[in-house]
Image: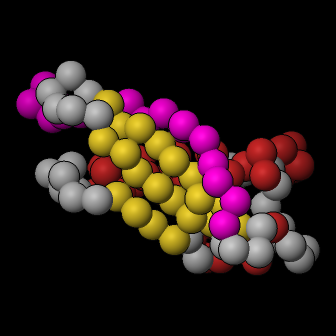
Amino acid sequence: MNENENTYNIRYVGFESVGDAGRLLEYAITSQEEATRRATVEIPAAAFSGPQRMTFQECAKVGFEKLRREIDADPQNRGLLTFVLTTEEIESLRPRRRAAAKKA
């Protein structure tokens, strides 16, 4: 980042259960240049079942990555940050698995 860009911090605040076992994750986005903003990321219940299921422990990291990418893509956007993740987004945002890293 260059010196003129706004630096920020994304902090996971907590979650709320929604629908049939989905999760609504809440984050606080802080910076020295502006007031704290809130953001939410919804992970549908379907993400927690099936062969590629996500663990509940992965949720906060996946939501963090979604917010980081969105803010980096449009740093001037000061609008409401609310997202519902798709299966494809979840797979692209998930941390790499250790087994895959050991094979390399």
Q: Quadrant of residue 6?
A: top left
Instruction: Left or right? Give the position of 69 relative to 99.
Output: left
Asked if residue 72 can be seen in this view, the reply is yes
From this view, report whether residue 10 is shown above or below residue 47.
above
From this view, report whether residue 75 is shown above or below residue 20.
above
At 59% from the left edge and 59% from the top edge, which residue is drawn?
Answer: 24
At 38% from the left edge and 30% from the top edge, which residue is drawn?
Answer: 9
Instruction: Left or right? Give the position of 91 relative to 101.
Output: left
Q: Give the color scheme: rainbow, by chain, secondary structure or one colour.
A: secondary structure
At 64% from the left edge and 54% from the top edge, which residue is drawn?
Answer: 16
Q: Which residues are magenta?
A: 1-18
- Residue 19 is situated, as x and y percent measured from the top left of the image, at 69, 74
- Farthest residue toward the top? 32
Viewer-closest of 87 and 32: 32
Quadrant for the N terminus in the image = top left
- Residue 92 is situated, as x and y percent measured from the top left of the image, at 60, 65
At 48% from the left edge and 33% from the top edge, which residue is drawn?
Answer: 11
